[in-house]
C-alpha cells in the first residue's frame, strides 16, 4: 500500500481581505517551515504572483524538491491581459465569486485565452509549463485543454462540500484521485474514449465521519479538514487540533485504500493570518515526519503523485477511506468506496449500520458549465444520486438504506473489514441474518445473508423523498436527475413495495453496465 501525502500551498499575490505584505510573509514562512524537513512539496502560483518580482525571485531560488505549479483562478490582471473587461466587483482585483474568479464564468473560447496567457506567463518566468494545476473549480472543457495542450499530470480541486464560499462539489470521489470524464470534471470516465488524461485530486483531507453531515447544520462555513486555517472558525476538530490530526492520520493511513491512500496538507496564503496557520501546519508536518521515518508515509509533489498513478492505473482506480475509531469518543464508523462506476458510504452508530450515500457515475452526464457560462456568484458540480444522506435528511432524521429483518433495523454484534486487489468487503455478524457481508468491486456491489434470507431486505428510510426515483421495476429502478435519465440494475434480488430490495438465494447484487 502506497500512502501518499501532498504538501500543497497555493499562493495569491493580492486579496483585499489581507495585506500584500502579510500574504508574502505567510508564503515565506510556509516555505521555511516545510524546508526544514526536506519534504517534496508543491506551491501553486496565481497569475498575479507571476507579475510580482518578489514572488518571482523567491521561487526562482527554491529548493530542488519544491515543485511550482499554477493556481488557475482569474484575477483582474489576467482578464485584462487577454482583452477582457474585468467582471469582478469594483475594487476587488481578486474576486472569489464564480462568474468572475473561476473559469466557469467565461466562454470556452475565453477560457482557452485565459489558460494560454497564464501558461505562457508561467513558462516565461520559470522556463517550462507547469505539471501541476489547482483551482477550487475547474470545468471539464478547461481540464481537457490543459491536459491535451500543456500535458499537465495532475490537478487539485476542492473537497466535497455544499455551498462553502459559493462552491458546491457533491457526489464525486470523496478522497484520492480519478481520471475525469470529458463531460463532467467531478465524474470519473468509464471508457478510455471519454477520459481526460489527467489526474484530479481532492484537496484538504476531509473527516470521513463528520464532514459529510456537517452541512445539515445550515452553516456552509463549517469544515472539519486538515486545513490548519480551520482555527479561524473555532471548533473542536480539524487541522488546528492536535488530537484530531493524530486521529485523522492514524485512521487514514491504517493500511486501507485498495489502490493507494492519500491526503493533502497545506494552506493558501490569503484569508488567514500566520497565527491561524502556524501551529496546525507545524504540528502536521511533525506527525508526517514521524510517519515517513517509520516507513508508513511517502511525501510526493502533486505532479509526482499524478505521474505515479498514470504509471500504475490506466483508468480511475478503486479507492477507499475508512475510519473505525470515533474521534469524539462515540461508537461510530465510516467506510467510503470510490470506483469509476459509483461511490458509496457505509456508516454506523452504535450497533446499527446503513448506507449513508450512494451516487452513480456516468461519463455522459454533462456538467452545467461544459459549454455554458456561469453568471452567478455560486456554482454547483454533482453526479447522479441514488440516495443522498445530506439532501434526503433532516437534522432530526437521517436518511439511509438500512438492513432490515421483518421490517426492523438489524443490529450487529461485531464487524470485520478487509481489502483485496479488486475491492473491499465489510462483514457484520448479526443475530437475525447471521453473517451479513457487503462486497464492493468496480463493477458490482453484493450483499450476502447467511440465514433467514426470506425475512431480510434492504429498505430506504428517508426524511425527504428520494429526489431521483421515477419508477421501480422488478430488476431495476428508473431514475432522473437534472434532466438526465439513468437506471440502477439488480443482478440478484428484486425490488418490492416502496423500493424495498428483497434477496434471491440469500444475495442482492447491483451491477454496472459496461456501456453508459
Image (tube, rainbow, N blue to C red):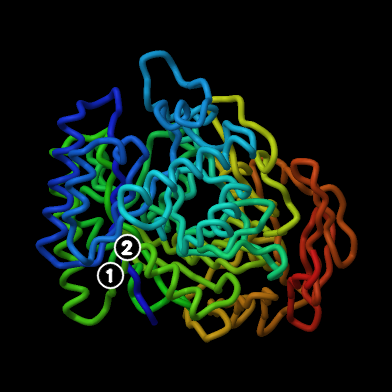
Q: Residues within 10 Å of mark 1 (few under 14, many from 20)?
A: many
**Callout 2 secondary element:** strand
Residue 355, numbered label: none
Q: Is residue 383 above or below residue 314?
A: above
Name the N-terminal-most of marks 2 and 1: 2
**Callout 1 secondary element:** strand
Where is residue 301 drawn, in percent x and y?
A: 32, 65
Where is residue 375 drawn, in percent x and y?
A: 61, 25
Q: Quadrant of the N terminus?
A: bottom left
Total of numbered circles in the picture? Answer: 2
In depth, the one of 253 and 374 nearer the eye is 374
Residue 6, numbered label: 2
Q: Is residue 121 above or below residue 309?
A: above
Instruction: Tell me if residue 238 can be seen.
Output: no
Name the residue: 75% across, 55% down.
364
Q: Quadrant of the C terminus?
A: bottom right
In the picture, measured across the screen, residue 344 lies left or right of residue 97, that is right
Q: CA distance from mark 2 to mark 1?
A: 6 Å
Name the residue: 71% across, 79% down.
452
Q: Is residue 79 above or below residue 473?
A: above
Q: Residue furthest top?
A: 90
Callout 2 touching callout 1 (CB < 8 Å): yes
In the picture, measured across the screen, residue 87 lies left or right of residue 441, that is left
In the picture, measured across the screen, residue 225 lies left or right of residue 388, that is left
What residue does disc 1 label? 299
Name the residue: 81% across, 59% down.
487
Where is residue 325 drawn, in percent x and y?
A: 34, 66
Name the residue: 65% across, 58% down.
181
Amino acid at each position: 500500500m502506497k500512502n501518499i501525502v501532498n504538501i500543497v500551498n497555493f499562493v495569491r499575490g493580492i486579496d483585499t481581505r489581507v495585506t500584500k505584505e502579510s500574504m508574502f510573509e505567510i508564503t515565506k514562512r510556509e516555505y521555511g517551515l516545510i524546508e526544514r524537513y526536506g519534504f517534496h512539496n508543491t506551491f501553486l502560483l496565481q497569475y498575479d504572483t507571476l507579475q510580482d518580482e518578489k514572488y518571482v525571485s523567491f521561487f526562482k531560488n527554491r529548493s530542488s524538491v519544491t515543485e511550482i505549479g499554477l493556481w488557475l483562478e482569474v484575477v483582474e490582471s489576467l482578464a485584462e491581459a487577454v482583452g477582457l473587461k474585468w467582471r469582478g466587483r469594483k475594487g476587488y482585483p481578486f474576486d472569489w465569486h464564480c462568474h468572475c474568479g473561476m473559469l466557469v464564468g467565461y466562454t470556452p473560447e475565453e477560457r482557452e485565452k485565459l489558460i494560454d496567457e497564464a501558461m505562457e506567463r508561467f513558462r516565461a518566468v520559470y522556463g517550462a509549463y507547469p505539471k501541476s494545476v489547482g483551482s477550487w473549480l475547474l470545468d471539464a472543457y478547461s481540464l481537457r485543454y490543459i491536459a491535451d495542450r500543456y500535458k499537465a499530470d495532475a490537478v487539485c480541486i476542492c473537497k466535497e462540500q455544499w455551498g462553502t464560499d459559493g462552491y458546491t462539489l457533491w457526489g464525486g470521489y470523496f478522497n484520492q484521485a480519478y481520471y475525469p470524464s470529458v463531460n463532467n470534471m467531478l465524474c470519473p470516465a468509464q471508457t478510455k474514449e471519454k477520459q481526460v488524461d489527467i489526474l484530479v485530486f481532492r484537496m484538504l483531507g476531509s473527516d470521513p465521519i463528520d464532514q459529510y453531515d456537517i452541512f445539515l447544520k445550515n452553516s456552509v462555513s463549517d469544515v472539519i479538514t486538515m486545513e490548519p486555517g480551520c482555527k479561524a472558525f473555532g471548533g473542536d476538530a480539524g487541522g488546528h487540533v492536535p488530537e484530531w490530526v493524530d486521529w485523522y492520520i492514524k485512521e487514514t493511513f491504517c493500511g486501507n485504500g485498495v489502490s493507494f491512500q492519500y491526503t493533502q496538507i497545506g494552506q493558501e496564503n490569503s484569508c488567514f493570518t500566520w497565527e491561524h496557520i502556524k501551529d496546525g501546519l507545524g504540528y502536521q508536518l511533525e506527525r508526517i515526519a514521524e510517519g515517513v521515518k517509520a516507513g508508513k508515509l511517502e511525501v510526493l509533489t502533486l505532479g509526482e503523485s499524478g505521474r505515479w498513478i498514470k504509471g500504475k492505473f490506466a483508468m480511475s482506480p478503486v479507492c477507499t477511506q475508512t475510519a473505525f475509531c470515533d474521534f469524539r469518543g462515540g461508537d461510530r464508523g465510516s467506510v467510503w468506496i470510490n470506483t469509476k462506476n459509483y461511490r458509496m458510504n457505509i456508516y454506523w452508530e452504535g450497533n446499527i449500520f446503513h448506507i449513508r450515500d450512494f451516487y452513480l457515475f456516468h461519463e455522459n452526464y454533462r456538467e452545467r458549465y461544459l459549454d455554458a457560462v456561469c453568471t452567478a456568484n455560486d456554482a454547483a458540480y454533482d453526479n447522479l444520486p441514488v440516495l443522498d444522506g445530506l439532501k434526503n435528511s433532516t437534522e432530526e432524521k437521517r436518511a439511509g438504506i438500512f438492513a432490515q429483518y421483518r421490517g426492523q433495523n438489524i443490529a450487529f454484534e461485531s464487524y470485520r473489514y478487509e481489502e483485496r486487489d479488486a475491492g473491499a468487503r465489510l462483514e457484520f455478524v448479526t443475530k437475525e441474518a447471521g453473517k451479513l457481508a457487503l462486497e464492493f468491486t468496480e463493477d458490482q456491489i453484493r450483499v450476502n445473508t447467511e440465514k433467514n434470507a426470506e425475512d431480510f431486505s434492504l429498505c430506504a428510510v428517508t426524511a425527504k423523498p428520494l429526489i431521483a426515483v421515477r419508477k421501480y421495476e422488478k430488476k431495476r429502478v428508473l431514475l432522473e436527475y437534472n434532466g438526465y435519465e439513468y437506471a440502477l440494475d439488480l443482478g440478484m434480488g428484486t425490488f418490492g413495495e416502496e423500493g424495498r430490495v428483497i434477496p434471491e438465494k440469500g444475495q442482492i447484487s447491483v451491477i454496472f453496465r459496461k456501456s453508459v
